[in-house]
Image (cartoon, rainbow, N blue to C red):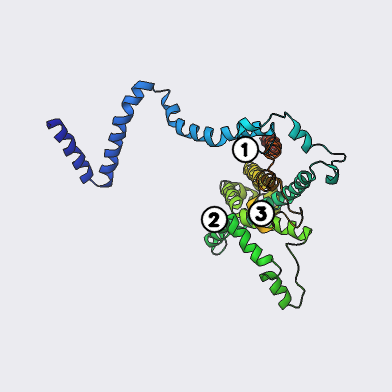
Amino acid sequence: MAARATVVQRAAALVGRGVEGVYVLLMNAVGLLMEPLQRLVGMRRMAWLFLLPNLLVFTIFILFPMVLNVYYATTSGPRLYPQDRPFVGTANFERLFTCTDYTNPNTCLEDRFWRAARNTGVFVLFQVGGMVAISLLTALVLNRKVVARGFFRSVFFYPVLLSPVVVALIWKWILQRDGVLNAMLVSLGGEPINFLLSGSWAMAWVIMVSIWANMGFYTLILLAGLQSIPVELYDAGAIDGTSTLQSFRHITLPLLMPTMMVVLVLALIRAVQMFDEVFVLTGGGPGSATLLLVQYIYQTGFGTQNPRFGLAAATSVTLGAVLLVATLLQLRIGRGSERHLA
């Protein structure tokens, strides 16, 4: 009883010291719990003990679904449970890649897959290229001493905080035939344009909206990279008489290249996985003009009354393999450029 009273008195004294005392009390409590556990499992195994919760979450929600997806890609039938699905080997992959002329989707068994693949290629090329260029230009401007610089930094980042569905709904309201943009055109004496009902217009606006919604995130990364470049290098260049363009080419761009590779990899992964904004804005239309691969996977597996889970899984495995190869290639090119600069 006396020992227990002493412990209570010490705890009360610590609490009486305020926040610092509560912190010390919590650390002592954690120590009482962890010290016996450390003696039981050993010092070297404690790291694995702390990693165990994350490893369990990764296994349950990422690793297991990936393995299950590969299994689904080798099975067929409309049934969902794995034990009810017959094994068909590579039949789903063969169906995807059976074409008379790969440049003409109409000659393929799965013509929508190839239309989606072509649309995804166009989308990734222009969206990633435009995203990196505009984000870099914005970061360069925001890195200078401009009026209300903090305000403009927050303004450019604000769209990233919005839900992609909200972004798509806002732009759909602006771009539809009786929307804000057409109302402005009509007020200026022009004719309304079906921005979302024309294939070329729809793809262009999908790319533009995606860039607008995500560029703030990549601008922030590039801005951090710019701020890590020592100012002394620019001062030395100014003494040597280098122009602004020469400083950008020989100082900024080489030192920013590692950050640029991070941005390229992240932008590529995000662009290939694009779904929500395009699905809400155009639904993949008109026709299949803005149908991307992730939406094709969704429609094949869940968007029809006769779901083809095996074909959808095979498409996702193919997409994952292509994305992995592209990412590794980007990283290898980036490492090669870093060695060249070194």
Looking at the image, tell me whether mark 1 or mark 2 is earlier in sequence order: 1
**Helix, strand or loop status at disc 2:** helix
User: In which quadrant of the rendered image does the C terminus lie?
Assistant: top right
Residue drawn 72% across the image and 29% down it = 88
Counting residues from the N terminus, which is met first, the one under dot 3 or under dot 1? 1
Mark closest to the chain's N terminus, 2 or 3: 2
Residue 71, picture quadrant: top right
**Which quadrant does the N terminus fall into?**
top left
At x 42% / y 28%, what residue is drawn? 49
Label 2: few (<14), some (14–19) or many (≥20) C-alpha neighbours in 10 Å: few
Q: CA distance from mark 2 to mark 3?
A: 19 Å
Q: Label 1, secondary structure: give it.
A: loop
Residue 208 horizontal/vertical position (percent)? 69, 58
Picture coordinates of residue 11, whole percent (x, y): 21, 39
Q: Amino acid at mark 3?
A: Phe
The residue indicated by pointer 2 is 161
Front-most of residues 290 and 85: 85
Kindly indicate whether the residue at mark 1 contacts the one at mark 3 (C-beta within 8 angstroms). no
Q: Amino acid at mark 1?
A: Leu
Tell me which corner region of the image, top left, top right, bottom left or bottom right, holds residue 196: bottom right
Q: How many marks?
A: 3
Q: Which residue is mark 3?
A: 279
Amino acid residing under circle 2: Leu
**In the rendered view, would you say 247 is above or below 258?**
below
Q: Nearer the viewer, mark 2 or mark 3?
A: 3
Query: CA–CA distance between discs 1 and 2?
Result: 36 Å
Q: Nearer the viewer, residue 193 or 71?
A: 71
Residue 68 appears at what percent x and percent y? 61, 32
